[in-house]
């Protein structure tokens, strides 16, 4: 039974049909795939792009870092009406620590950049930056939380199908 069904598939999956499937996957879905791949590539260096564009993120490394409590206290002193939600360690020696705060009753998210060596608040920006833009675009195409995530994940299977049909069509490469 298994051998007969395998032979039926082999009879159906001719080189011509595989080529048509491969071409359809490549031509019809390529523009969205390019967007997903390009935004993923840019997302890998998005923190460095933010560092170049925003002077508040840049610091000169010092000898010793201040404590997390000091960073928290400095942000609370600078923004007394804010709720401190998270403190993020610097990702490199020349990066500022990032503190996520929510301001006011409408709870607007803001990023506060604090020098981890001096504890000085260096600047505040909105939630959206280059990193967030490209990572959200890559991960879910700015669609609904679940729907976009499933769509982008589905394109992994499209890429796998394109790889398999390409290898089967071009056997002697």
Image (cartoon, rainbow, N blue to C red):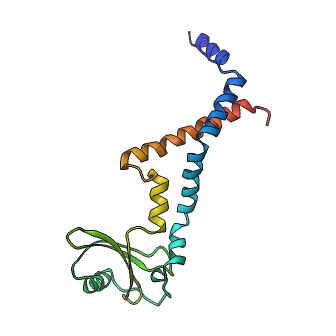
Instruction: Count every numbered label the image shows and give the total.
Output: 0
Pick the front one: 145 or 63: 145
User: Which residue, as the protein is rendered here, is positioned at the far right?
Assistant: 172
Quadrant location, the N terminus: top right
Q: Name the residue located 44 percent from the left edge and 57 percent from the top edge.
A: 136
**Horizontally, is 67 left or right of 9 in the view?**
left
Specify the quadrant that holds the C terminus. Answer: top right
Residue depicted at x 25% and y 86%: 77
Is 116 drawn above or below residue 99 in the view shown?
below
Using residue 74 as the reference point, say whether residue 141 is left or right of it: right
Q: Position of residue 65 (x, y in %)?
A: 40, 85
Task: Where is residue 161? Give x, y as percent.
Answer: 60, 35
The one of 50 and 168 positioned closer to us in this rendering: 50
Residue 110 vertical position relative to residue 151 in the rendered view, above or below: below
Q: Residue at x 55, y 66 (%)?
A: 45
State the residue at coordinates (58%, 13%). Answer: 5
Q: Position of residue 93 (x, y in %)?
A: 50, 80
Q: Nearer the viewer, residue 22 or 94?
A: 22
x, y percent for residue 22: 66, 33
């Amino acid at each position: 039974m298994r051998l007969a069904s395998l032979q039926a598939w082999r009879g159906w999956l001719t080189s011509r049909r595989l080529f048509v499937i491969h071409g359809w996957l490549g031509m019809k879905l390529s523009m969205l795939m390019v967007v997903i791949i390009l935004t993923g590539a840019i997302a890998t260096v998005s923190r460095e792009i933010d560092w170049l564009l925003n002077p508040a993120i840049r610091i000169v490394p010092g000898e010793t870092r201040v404590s997390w409590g000091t960073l928290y206290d400095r942000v609370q002193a600078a923004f007394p009406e804010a709720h401190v939600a998270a403190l993020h360690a610097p990702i490199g020696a020349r990066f500022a620590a990032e503190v996520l705060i929510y301001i006011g009753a409408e709870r607007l998210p803001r990023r506060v950049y604090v020098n981890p060596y001096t504890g000085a608040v260096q600047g505040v920006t909105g939630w959206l930056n280059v990193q967030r833009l490209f990572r959200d675009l890559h991960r879910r195409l700015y669609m609904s939380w679940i729907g976009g995530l499933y769509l982008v994940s589905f394109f992994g299977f499209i890429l796998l199908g394109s790889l398999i049909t390409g290898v089967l069509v071009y056997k002697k490469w």
